[in-house]
Amino acid sequence: MNAKKIPLFLLAALTLTGAAFGENNSFSLNAGVNGLCYSLFDVERIQHVTAHATVSGGAGVFFDAKYAEAAVDIVWGSQLSPIYPLDTESGSVSLTHLGFSLYGKYPFGVEKITLYPMAGFDYHLFLSGQVKDFDGNDYGARLSRGDDIDGEHTAGNRFDFFTAGIGLGMDFPLPKGLFIRAEMLLNYKFDSKIESDYRKNAQKWGYDYLSAVFGASGKIGVGYRFFER
């Protein structure tokens, strides 16, 4: 998907979902800001089992149509193992992504608190990466989204990836239409293009390559309900 079309896609899907599933024609529109953190844990086996971890944090904005939520986030993280072709002997890689998410949710009230199970997808656009040595110092040139990496592809279309998530959210009302929002999700990461190619090449080379990437994420923020009927 063209990155320029993603915000329009999320806005259209958000509006249509809220309109289609509004119970008894009830409908609301909310917006807010949040902080976030997430971690990914990658276990892979080629000739032996290895494990990698990514720890990230960031901030973003969300838009809520009662039965659907869209968000845009900027995320900074550190992967504690390198991503080829950035480097193969480093201690870590610092990463910056722009995230777009769309989640369906089903809210229900528990006294004053609104709870909602939720499920959906996140699309992570790679912005930049910097190899770190084992002492945490910058090593080599910084790789940006538009940089060529192999004569055929740029970093952006090789490192972008999707995650799927399922979890639980909570809204706690405040005066004058404000509310506090907290969400916790379990995530599954799909291969980026470079990871998918690596998997295929490993099989061609005769290796029995298996991997899976799971993680958890959390958000907490403040929102404002500016429309309700």
Image (cartoon, rainbow, N blue to C red):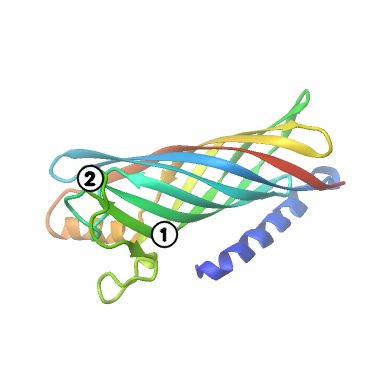
Q: Residue 169: x percent and y percent?
A: 62, 34
Q: Which residue is mark 1?
A: 126
Q: CA distance from mark 2 to mark 1?
A: 20 Å
Q: In the rendered view, does 185 fall on the left or right side of 213?
A: right
Q: Which mark is residue 206?
A: none
Q: Which residue is mark 2?
A: 91
- How packed is label 1: few (under 14 Cα within 10 Å), some, or many (20 or more)? many
- For residue 140, which quarter of the picture? bottom left
Residue 23, placed above or below residue 110: below
Q: In the rendered view, does 71 fall on the left or right side of 225?
A: left
Q: Residue 46: x percent and y percent?
A: 17, 46
Residue 42, placed above or below residue 85: above
Q: Amino acid at mark 2?
A: Gly
In this view, the residue in front, 46 or 89, is: 89
In this view, the residue in front, 59 or 136, is: 136
Q: Residue at x 38, y 71 (%)?
A: 146
Residue 5, placed above or below residue 165: below
Q: Residue 34: x percent and y percent?
A: 61, 43
Q: In the rendered view, does 88 fall on the left or right side of 52?
A: left
In this view, the residue in front, 60 or 103, is: 60
Q: Secondary structure at mark 1?
A: strand
- For residue 172, which quarter of the picture? top right
Q: Residue at x 64, y 39 (%)?
A: 221
In this view, the residue in front, 170 or 14, is: 170
- How packed is label 2: few (under 14 Cα within 10 Å), some, or many (20 or more)? some
Q: Residue 132: x percent and y percent?
A: 26, 50
The furthest residue to the top: 111
Q: Amino acid at mark 1?
A: Phe
Q: Secondary structure at mark 2?
A: loop
Upstream in the sequence, badge 2 or badge 1?
A: 2
